[in-house]
Image: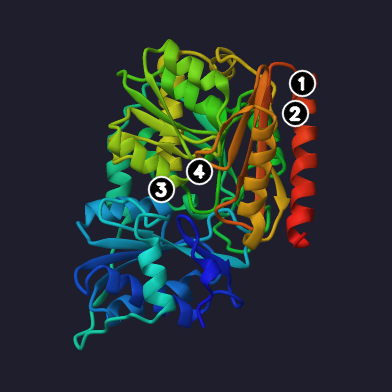
Amino acid sequence: MVKSHIFRAYDIRGVYGEDLDEEVAELIGLGYGTLLGNKGKVVVGRDVRLSGEVLANAVARGLSRAGCDVLDLGMVTTPMVYFSTVHFKVNGGVQVTASHNPPEWNGFKLVKPGGATLSAGAGMEELKDIVLNKRFREVDKRGQIEKVDALTPYVEFIASRFHLDGKLTIAVDYSNGATTIPLPRIAEKLGLEIKAINDVPDGRFPAHLPEPNEETLKDLQNFVVKMGADFGAGFDGDGDRVVFVDERGRIIPGDITLAIYVKHLEKKGKVVFDVSSSSALREIILEMGCEPVEMRVGRAFLLNAVREQNAVIGGEKSNHFYFPEIWGFDDAVYATLKMAEIVLKSGKRLSQLVDEIPHYPSIPIKTYECADEVKWKVVEDIAEQYRSRGLEINTIDGVKAYFDDGWVLIRPSNTMPQIKMTAEAKTEKRLREIVEEAEDLIKASIKKLASGR
């Protein structure tokens, strides 16, 4: 039986052996093949997770039952699947991944022609209906399943986008993830020196969870300084996110990274960013003569906005960066090379580039466990409390409440049973006050709604 909660805002995720198994994966493949009209070609890849190969093979069987030919990419990064949908001119794609989730999790990113993903309001509901209500269409003639090489054309394409004039050393934490597959080959072509830790693909993620954050990046921070590297790059499990560390060992927030990209754009235009980004980013966008476009958090929403708005770049505080020159895809390898290019062309240290951006006190995203069934109600409850006080609020994604000297954003996670909160203020003292009040509201609302009172 397929559980409905595995269908999320922009992917499918669950715990392997509880929510996902071969049967569920095959039905998802059959459902996606049905949605695609029982024809055409679909690329299928997987990240390093231990259940990946089993689930990828099952998805391929389901697609074949629906009459779709399958190009099996093997173990690849998620951006390599996006690239392959364009390169191989196929009708869709599936990447078996749970991105940064713990090792027992897995899931599916379903890709439409051109690399956009199925998401809420863009095909996910139709797929959910097909799978849960068994509205499958099988065909007599099954599709063929064929192994293909995506690595060689991907490496050639990405390397061709850069001419790095000068020597640079990048310290890398691969997080035992899939980025270990393409980056060494690309770096060799471009003459980049890579010093790496956790560079063996391992779905158990023995060093740390494949989630680059303050806790998991400590080893990289020390490694950057120890190696005398120009900067560091910490990757997630499937290679669509990267967090940078400057040569002094400081972690750079995603919105500040985007501000650095914006300051070194070759042309002006619209810049897409998410609602959790610092006010400093908007200031830089305007300073550079660009137009700010604020969006809700989530890859599908940012990618679509970058494409539809014909933006010059897009990015999220969670360290997804969207580049129109690679069809708007978020690719951690490309983002790393773009940062290398900026450092070399500017002649500045990364720490100097960071210090050119205004800094306002903020907190990293905090999470609060909250059942999927009530997390939306919790956010609505908090929004009403802020609204009743006469505060300006933005509900494009959860609730963002604005104060004279700061803001707080509270939103339900799209991938986990959690509420997420981040905040920014003009002073550390005011930040503490905003955060403490928001935490009290979140905890009280979760307690109230979880108990049904």
Q: In the image, is 312 to the left or to the right of 414?
A: left
Please rate how many residues cluster around mark 3, counting C-alpha atoms within 10 Å: few if below 14, some from 14 to 19, many from 20: some
- Residue tagged by mark 4? 241
x and y percentages locating residue 92 in the rendered image: 28, 61
Please rate how many residues cluster around mark 4, counting C-alpha atoms within 10 Å: few if below 14, some from 14 to 19, many from 20: many
Q: Is residue 262 visible?
A: yes
| Disc 1 element | helix
Q: Quadrant of residue 340?
A: top left
| Disc 3 element | helix
Q: Quadrant of residue 434?
A: top right
Amino acid on which the number 1 mark rests in the picture = Arg
Report, in whole angstroms, how far the alpha carbon at label 3 lies from the one at label 1. 34 Å
| Precedes in sequence: disc 2 or disc 4 | 4
Please rate how many residues cluster around mark 1, counting C-alpha atoms within 10 Å: few if below 14, some from 14 to 19, many from 20: some
x and y percentages locating residue 238 in the rendered image: 49, 53
x and y percentages locating residue 452 in the rendered image: 75, 62
Scheme of image coloration: rainbow
Are the residues tagged 3 and 2 within 8 Å (C-beta)? no
Are the residues tagged 1 and 2 within 8 Å (C-beta)? yes
Q: Residue at x 53, y 60 (%)?
A: 98
In-front residue for pair 424/159: 424
Q: Nearer the viewer, mark 3 or mark 2?
A: 2
- Residue tagged by mark 1? 430
- Residue tagged by mark 2? 434
The numbered dot on residue 202 is none
- Residue tagged by mark 3? 300
Please rate how many residues cluster around mark 2, counting C-alpha atoms within 10 Å: few if below 14, some from 14 to 19, many from 20: many
| Precedes in sequence: disc 4 or disc 3 | 4
Report, in whole angstroms, how far the alpha carbon at label 2 lies from the one at label 4. 29 Å
Q: How many marks?
A: 4
